[in-house]
């Protein structure tokens, strides 16, 4: 899958869940590239912000969208990597930048 296709897939997923992609394009591009690198390396789109242990059972929770993203968005306004952010009228408080 190409980067733009993955961005669209993640955007549709975010919209369907009531959040959105980070408005900071550099963050989104960085995370998308990391997901594609991990897919090429490991065969799965593991979150690029988490450590892959090579234990498939444990690592399954790290496949994007990871098992933790909803709770992180509720608590911090964004997921750990910053790909997904809560829908608000002011993104300056929930945007994670690199």
Image (spheres, grey):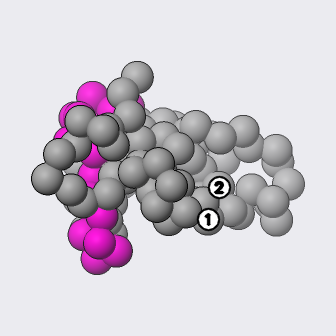
> What percent of the width, then of the height, locates residue 53?
82, 44
Q: Quadrant of the N terminus?
A: bottom left
Q: Nearer the viewer, mark 1 or mark 2?
A: 1
Tell me the element at label 1. loop
Q: Is residue 62 left or right of residue 53?
A: left
Q: Residue 31 colored magenta? A: no
Tell me the element at label 2. helix
> What percent of the width, then of the height, locates residue 25?
22, 35
Name the residue that disc number 1 marks: 67
Which is more N-terminal, label 2 or label 1? 2
> What percent of the width, then of the height, locates residue 94?
33, 43
Name the residue that disc number 2 marks: 62
Residue 40 showing in the rendered view: no
Instruction: Determine whether label 1 and label 2 are within 8 Å by CB.
Output: yes
What residue is drawn where x is 65% and y is 41%? 50
Q: Which mark is residue 55?
A: none
Q: CA distance from mark 1 to mark 2?
A: 7 Å
What residue is drawn where x is 53% and y is 44%? 80
Within 10 Å of the Cα at label 2, are there few (<14), some (14-19), or many (20+) other Cα atoms?
A: many
What residue is drawn where x is 51% and y is 55%? 75
Q: Residue 27 colored magenta? A: yes
Which residues make up the magenta segment? 15-30
Q: Is residue 97 left or right of residue 65?
A: left
């Amino acid at each position: 899958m190409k980067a733009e296709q993955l961005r669209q897939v993640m955007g549709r997923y975010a919209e369907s869940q009531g959040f959105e992609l980070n408005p900071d394009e550099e963050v989104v591009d960085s995370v998308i590239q990391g997901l594609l690198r991990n897919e090429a390396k490991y065969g799965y789109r593991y979150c690029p912000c988490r450590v892959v242990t090579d234990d498939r059972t444990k690592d399954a929770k790290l496949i994007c969208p990871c098992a933790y993203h909803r709770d992180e968005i509720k608590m911090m306004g964004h997921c750990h990597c910053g790909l997904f952010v809560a829908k608000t009228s002011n993104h300056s408080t929930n945007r994670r930048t690199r």
